[in-house]
Each structure stands twice: as C-alpha cells, then as structure tokens.
Image (cartoon, rainbow, N blue to C red):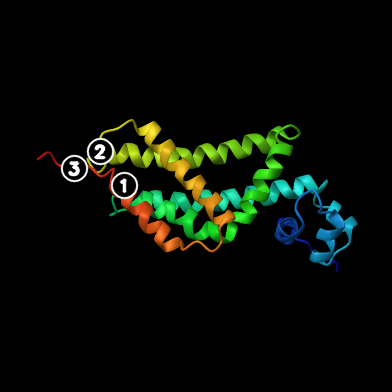
C-alpha cells in the first residue's frame, strides 16, 4: 500500500530547509538544487510542491512575518499590564528575538525590492503584515491615552515613531552583533517611561 503524503507537512519541510539555504547563500545565489540537497530529495520532487524558487521564498517570508505578528499580538491581548509595559515587551521582541533573526529579516528586505516589481501578491502580503504591526502600536498608544496611562499626544505619529524605533533596532542588531542588548533595552525603557501620563501638580 503506497504511503500517504501529507502535502502541507512536506511543503513546510521544504521551506524550512530553504530558509537556511537562503540565509547561507542569499536569494540570488540559491538554486532549487541547493534546496533539494538539504531536503534530501530530488529537484523534481520539489517541483511537485512549488513552481519555482520565488514561490518557496514567498512561503519562507510569510512564515517569518506571521510568527512575528503572532508574538506581538499575544502581548497586545495580555491583561493586567499597562500600555507602556506592553510597548516595552513588544520592543523587547525586536531587541532580543531579532538579534538571531536580523540576518533573515534583511535577506527578506533585500529580495522584497526585487519582488516588488514582479510579484504583487508578495508585495500586498508584506504590506499587510507591516501595517498590522504598525496598527498594533497605534492601538496600544491610543488605549494608553484613553486610560490615562500615556500623555495626551497624536496617537498616530507617536505609534509611527515607536514603530520606527522597532525597525531601527533590527538594523542595529544586524550591523553590530556585539551590542549589549540589555543596556540597549534599558535605555529604550527610559524613553518609553517618558511618555507615561503624569498627574497635574
């Protein structure tokens, strides 16, 4: 009796292996043969699940950003902590978790510039994730202002500024891997504390 293949499981196996190849060799230098070797399967088998290298990269990218959004979303839903503490916890993901993932993030960012002109589905999906993260910061800031946890300010511009800080964190962890991230985080916490609501004297 022939073995029943779980298509989704096999696709995940392929794009997980592909992630490592993309990181090691870069998108342009990676071939389907490279991915097939790491997966220990023939190139023709890869074609049964993906049309080309770009489609595999699309899956790798979506997986990365989906995980990021999921982690941030779980912090948003936490109860019993203030808005500023939520912002700190969200930024800690970019500071500590992104240290390991910063190379992966920049591989994605570089290829995005190429795929932008060639794959509108990828571009739209990326924009969706990008705006989702930005909106999370906006919702927390807006909620913080409403609950007198954050000083009155323009919630949109404040959230964009904080999101910009998150993106700069990824850049710094990519450029300087020797950075003491705990000191970096402590400094950012001081900045976030600066937007806390202050009772009138």
Tell me whether the residue at label 3 lies in contact with that at label 1, contact meaning CB atoms closer than 8 angstroms: no
Tell me whether the residue at label 3 lies in contact with that at label 2, contact meaning CB atoms closer than 8 angstroms: yes
Q: Which residue is mark 2?
A: 151
Give x and y (percent) for residue 21: 75, 59
Q: Residue at x 35, y 33 (%)?
A: 155
Quarter of the picture containing the C terminus is top left
| Crowd tier of the residue under label 3, counting other residues whose Cα lies within 10 Å: few below 14, some 14–19, many 20 or above | few
Which is nearer the N-term, disc 2 or disc 1?
1
Which is nearer the N-term, disc 3 or disc 1?
1
181 or 56: nearer the eye? 181
Can residue 78 be seen in the rendering of this structure?
Answer: no
Q: Mark 3 or mark 1, which is nearer to you?
A: 3
Which is nearer the N-term, disc 3 or disc 2?
2
In the image, farthest residue toward the left: 201
Q: Residue at x 87, y 58 (%)?
A: 33
Residue 92 in which image quadrant: bottom left
Q: Which residue is mark 1?
A: 83
Can residue 201 be seen in the rendering of this structure?
Answer: yes
Circle 1: element type? helix
Q: Which residue is mark 3?
A: 198
Q: Residue at x 25, y 38 (%)?
A: 151
As displayed, is residue 27 above or below residue 142? Answer: below
């Amino acid at each position: 009796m022939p073995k029943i293949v779980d298509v989704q499981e096999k696709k995940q196996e392929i794009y997980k292996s592909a992630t490592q190849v993309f990181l090691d060799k870069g998108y342009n230098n990676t071939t389907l043969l490279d991915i097939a070797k790491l997966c220990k399967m023939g190139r023709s088998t890869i074609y049964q699940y993906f049309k080309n290298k770009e489609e595999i990269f699309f899956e790798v990218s979506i997986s990365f950003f989906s995980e990021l959004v999921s982690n941030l979303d779980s912090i948003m839903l936490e109860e019993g902590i203030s808005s500023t503490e939520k912002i700190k916890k969200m930024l800690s993901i970019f500071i500590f978790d992104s240290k390991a993932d910063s190379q992966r993030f920049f591989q994605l960012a570089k290829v995005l510039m190429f795929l932008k002109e060639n794959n509108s589905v990828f571009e739209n999906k990326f924009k969706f994730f990008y705006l989702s993260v930005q909106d999370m910061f906006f919702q927390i800031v807006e909620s913080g202002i409403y609950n007198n946890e954050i000083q009155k300010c323009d919630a949109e511009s404040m959230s964009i500024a904080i999101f910009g800080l998150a993106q700069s964190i990824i850049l710094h962890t990519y450029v300087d891997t020797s950075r003491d991230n705990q000191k970096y985080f402590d400094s950012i916490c001081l900045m976030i504390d600066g937007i806390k609501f202050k009772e009138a004297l």
